[in-house]
Image (cartoon, rainbow, N blue to C red):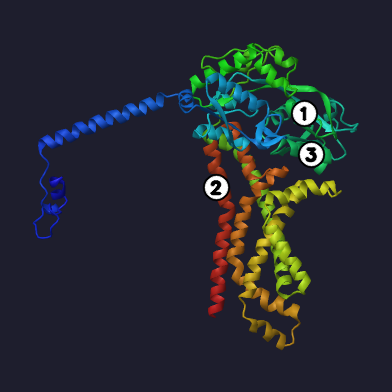
Amino acid sequence: MERAMERHGEPIDGSAGRAAVAPSRRASPSPRFAMRSLLVACVASALIGFGLSTTALADGLDDVRARGVLRWGADEEGGGPYVYADPNDRSRRIGFEVELADLIASRLGVRAEFRQGQWDKLPDLVQRGDIDIVLNGYEWTPAWAERFGTSIPYYVYELQLLARSGDGTLSDWSDLKAPSERGKRRIAVLGGSAAQAYLEQNHADSVELVLFDGVTDAMRAVELNADGIDATLQDLPIAVFFADGFPGLARVGDPVGRGFYTILVKKSDRRLLAAINDAILAALRDGSLRAVLSNYGLWNETQRMRGLEMDADGGFQPGTVRADGAAEVREYEPLRGWRVLSDRGPLLIRAAGITVLLSCLAMPLAVLIGLTMALTRLFGPKWPGRVAALYVEVVRGTPLVLQLYVIFFLLPEMGISINALWAAVIGLAVNYSAYEAEIYRAGMLAIPKGQMEAALALGMPRWLALRRVIVPQATRIVIPPVTNDFIALFKDTAVCSVITVVELSKEYYIHARSTGSVLELGVLTALLYLAMSYPLAMLTGWLERRLRRERTL
């Protein structure tokens, strides 16, 4: 201790009068001390290296058993029959995947723990280590098999076409080839799903796809004939589960497009994958998996006709399953680098055009509505002013996604059907108008009252004084915040994907998921957003400099 205090130049006994060894006079370490330090460093490095190598060799199964919990990820928003709230106890989740997770966890000797995640982001949560497995109706695809460990199927699904009851123009699959009065048949599907891939592969020339984020949204749009949507293609479990909830829909033709629900794990978690496969196989043999599926009306002849095998890595290959005879194995070649940019880049650029169109149509409307609300509150009669204030508070206090739902889904029930693109424009304009109203109100309050009094003294009517004196001066003040909102609007167009508008963000999610090129396409998407917003920032700076020069003249 005394040597340590001396090395730091501090008095040994705490008195100020004692001489201390200054840091500049510190003695050099002895050879023995240097050798000892080197040995300690070598041992520490070896221990760290051993720890890192042990961590690298560790498998997810060890972590699951160590914590006693299998964390499985799903999106409760997708609803039944996968994961949904018990009608009798909203705090409890039920669904055939909930029971399957409990079944697998019990065979691993642990407890299942549900983790909520957005459906298309669940694989990212596995990669981050936030969850151990993805169990949420993920169809086996070559892309998933390339990036993740894929279990043997826990369900063999089929696709069912649903149309409006009584629609005599759609009674079989062959009717899709006959165009409707509006042209191609418009079919609603879940974006990035097997239904989308099936229609693109088999009916690309005869149908127009409308992408939704939720299956019930797609089914509701068909039932309401929203935006001219004729039918929807859904996984058979969804068609079975929601049959009573959508009495206005009817099945069209036989199920098609047989595929496989699989569990995703990290590619490196081979022992965890093998344990999950063993649990599924055991559940098949002893009938417990059949009991789970039967609870939700999902056990059928298709589930009986399958023999399961695993590949060399303990994963699943569709060619080993005989659900309907020989199943063709598609070759998957991941896209990377410049190849994916040249292949998918034009699609992102086209989607960026939709983003620009939405923003440039919505923002002028938002400014016009907002300015009107601000003028009404400040200079209008009492009751219209209160209505304008209520409008601002209601619109500003409710989320954009809810407003889009009201415009796109609720208005058709009142007999008002609006095209998806214009519904997005109206929703964005209404939402942003509340913020523009407050910006313009603040700008006009910053104008001295003497300006209006002088204009009225010169004989100007109030409306003319507002148009020529007050509003022009307020516009100069509000240019920076309005431009900032315009830039923010480019990003908020991403919310419009909930009503089938495929803009830049949605297009990115679709192709990043299908190709696995998250980084390359992400960089291109970011550059496209920057290319849209940066010119606005430059324009704002130019306007501010020009207005400053005018004020100094």
Q: Which residue is mark 1?
A: 239
Task: Say if mark 1 contacts mark 3, CB within 8 Å.
Answer: no
The residue at the point 82 percent across, 36 percent down is 230
The circle drawn on residue 527 is 2
Q: Secondary structure at mark 1?
A: helix
Q: CA distance from mark 1 to mark 3?
A: 13 Å
From the top left corner, tell me how far across and down residue 547 is, in percent: 57, 73
From the top left corner, tell me how far across and down residue 126 is, in percent: 53, 32
Position of 43 compared to 407: left or right? left
From the top left corner, tell me how far across and down residue 137 is, in percent: 65, 28
User: How many labels were placed on the picture?
Assistant: 3
Q: Which residue is mark 3?
A: 220
Amino acid type of the residue that numbered disc 1 sits on in the rendered structure: Ala
Q: Nearer the viewer, residue 40 or 503?
A: 40
Q: Relative to 488, is 304 above or below?
A: above
Q: Quadrant of the C terminus?
A: bottom right
Amino acid type of the residue that numbered disc 2 sits on in the rendered structure: Leu
Amino acid type of the residue that numbered disc 3 sits on in the rendered structure: Arg
Q: Which of the two discs, 1 and 2, labels the residue nearer the N terminus?
A: 1
Q: Secondary structure at mark 2?
A: helix
Task: Say if mark 1 contacts mark 2, CB within 8 Å.
Answer: no
Residue 268 visible, this orientation? no
